[in-house]
Amino acid sequence: IYPLFSRLLHQDEAALQRVLNASTKITAWVGVTAAIGLWTLGDLIMAIVFGSAFAPAGVVFKTLVWMGIFEVISGNVRWLLVAAHRQSSVLAAQIVGAAVAIGGCFALTPAYGDVGAAIAVVAAQAAIWLVALWRARDLPVRTTLLPALPAAVAGIIALAVIVLWQPPALIAAIVAGAVMLVGAALDPKFFPALQSLSVAKGADPLGRKTND
């Protein structure tokens, strides 16, 4: 996405805004869906990969998966900053994130152990995203969070269904995936966002080259 951001930032700010919104929307749907899926299967994954003795470590894994949402979505803002030659802003965000991770580990680990450390890492990734958003506030495009809102709402609904129903892990993953799939299909801007990204990168949704 970086080459696209870099080109549009200097050529077409309106097109850059559309691409940024589209990328934020798609990464939100991907990030939230992946995080919920891994969260529902966390214990099972740990048991399969490392053996049944490691199944209790699933709670740590299930906590860490939430950092993926912030990592994926914040990439849009961080690459935008790099495209604008604002690497110092990305560095500032990383420094804040490191401070949150270290401070959070010191504060939470004594009481909550490895889960506390995992929470600190998730908070650090969220801090990186928030600082990047703040540092990008004066760029010519708006780094709004609104495109990610439908995915967040669908994710909350999926989590509520799973928590209240408490089905087995595999069924929970299937249900969560179904909720997210329906949510994406009902999002009126999801498929236009896919098309916008495809066209902006030089190909339409069928893979044919477009004219520059």
Image: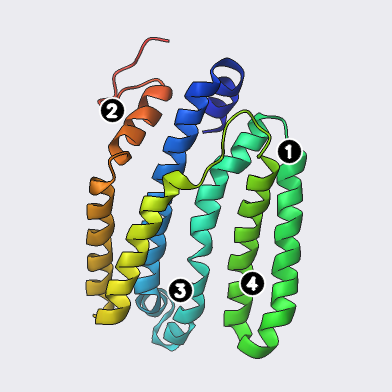
Instruction: Mark 3 vs mark 4: give the one in front.
Output: 4
Q: Where's the C terminus, which quadrant?
A: top left
Q: Residues within 10 Å of mark 2 (few under 14, many from 20)?
A: few
The Cα–Cα distance between marks 3 and 4, rounded to whole angstroms, is: 14 Å
Give the amino acid type for the residue marked by disc 4 in the picture. Answer: Ala
Determine which residue is flagged by label 2: 205
Give the amino acid type for the residue marked by disc 2 in the picture. Answer: Pro
Q: Of marks 3 and 1, which one's residue comes earlier in the chain?
A: 3
The Cα–Cα distance between marks 3 and 1, rounded to whole angstroms, is: 32 Å
Could you say where residue 87 lies in the image, as x and y percent from the top left? 73, 38
Q: Which mark is residue 87?
A: 1
Q: Of marks 2 and 1, which one's residue comes earlier in the chain?
A: 1
* 53 with respect to 5 (left or right): left
Q: Mark 4 falls on what kind of element?
A: helix
The Cα–Cα distance between marks 2 and 4, rounded to whole angstroms, is: 40 Å
Q: Mark 3 falls on what kind of element?
A: helix
Residues tagged 1 and 4 counted as in contact (Cβ below 8 A): no
Q: Of marks 2 and 4, which one's residue comes earlier in the chain?
A: 4
Q: Is residue 194 above or below residue 94?
A: above
Q: Is residue 183 above or below residue 119?
A: above
Q: Mark 2 falls on what kind of element?
A: loop
- Image point 25% across, 25% down: which residue? 206
Determine which residue is flagged by label 3: 62
Q: Is residue 43 visible?
A: yes
